[in-house]
Amino acid sequence: MNETMKRRILFVDDEPMVLKGLQRTLRKMRQDWDMTFVSSGCEALDVLGKKPMDVIVSDLRMPEMDGGRLLAEVKKQHPHLVRIILSGQLDQEMTLRSVQLAHQSLSKPCDVKVLKHTLGKLFALRDFLSDKSIKSIISQIDSLPSLPSIYTEIVSEMQSDDPAINKVGQIIAKDLSMTAKILQMVNSAFFGLFRKINSPEQAVMMLGLETIKALVLSVKIFSEFNQKSFSWFKIDDLFSHSLAVSLYAKTILKNENLDQGLINNSMMAGLLHDLGKLVLATNFEEPYRQVLAAAQGSGKNLLDLEYEAFGTSHAEIGAYLMGLWRLENDIIEAIAFHHLPTRSMTHNLGLLTAVHVGDALDHDARTPSGDNTELQCDTEYLDKLEITGQIPRWRQVCSELTERNA
């Protein structure tokens, strides 16, 4: 591989034997990776100040400057870097505190195949979102929406040493319109709660911090869309669909007993998977209005029409924005590839799968023919994961969820 095309990776570990072991086991990757090995956080920052890098892979437990502090500094000084933390079994508490600083956390000692696959996925997503068509569309937008302050307040409280449910509830309660919308949502049939929720604190207690965090972000984004100015765009239908997808994705992941982190992220990924449609509607009103009209009138695939008109789609645009907001990598991936999952490098059942299938299930439920139709899923992707046979069961549990909450 050309030297300028190599991925530049900085490894940081205070144990000399670990660094030597990494150098030895990664020797075969020298054709693809330009690797630098250092033994401290200070040394790593010094290297980054002199030499551009694509990735930093750091041990968590190190003297003087641990991996968490190092990645916090890297995030501030070099935000473009992919950040990976390595942690042992005894580092769970520290890992939780570092999760917002790293794009990925891997167990130590690190399996070379796992590291290669992880880096491959991260690079594939980054390359996908750096496509010239996406950047061309983004450059025509006067101002991209910024991360709502109420969301950052909630995240800050959740990351504090002693996060409190009542404090999160108080943050929400300061915004009267947000409070009203959150209470309206949690008391709706979608959540199927058995008692009426009367305060944000109760909502947080019943649904959990991660769900509330996702609801706050999505409600804030959708509420800033002026429906009166865009009567042609069915914002309520889009929000209803997004909420259904989030609940279906969560149901699928729970049904498969998958990692709690993925289940937590399912609400955010589902609620924001079509965010790019809002960006297109508000910034390219007439062209996107024509695209939607063509999709409804001709029966053509909306994604194909978006590519014809803009060179990209709502999926990539939404994922690009979530990347700017530094959301978790698996959420960005699920948004980016929710229509075309084979483009991802994810080869296992996870968040992307759940959002992809959840999206198809809700679109199917909204068609007149209902349960008799074939789901519009990527069959090649499902076959590769060997999960095609699980679709009827997922369809059943999601249908039961809808019926229970009707």
Image: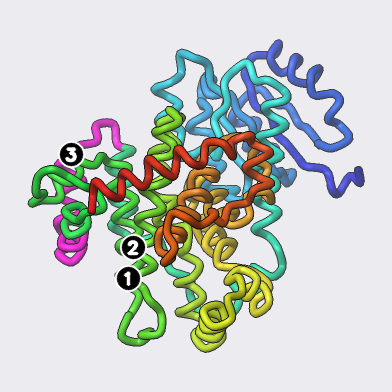
Q: Amino acid at mark 3?
A: Met
Quarter-of-image position of residue 139: bottom right
Q: Secondary structure at mark 1?
A: helix
Residue drawn 53% across the image and 16% down it: 88
Q: Amino acid at mark 2?
A: Ser
Tell me, yes or no, if residue 304 can be seen here. Answer: yes
Which residue position is annotated with label 1? 236
Tags 2 and 1 touching, CB below 8 Å: yes
Tell me, yes or no, if residue 284 can be seen here. Answer: no
Which secondary structure is most common in the magenta stretch? helix
Residue furthest right in the image: 2
* Magenta stretch bounds: 160-181
Nearer the camera: disc 1 or disc 3: 1
Please state the horizontal and vertical placement of residue 176, each as a whole percent of the image.
14, 64
Q: Amino acid at mark 1?
A: Asp
Which residue position is annotated with label 2? 240
Tags 1 and 3 touching, CB below 8 Å: no
Its colouring scheme is rainbow
Please state the horizontal and vertical placement of residue 155, each as a whole percent of the image.
33, 46
Q: Is residue 63 left or right of residue 186?
A: right
Residue drawn 51% across the image and 23% down it: 64
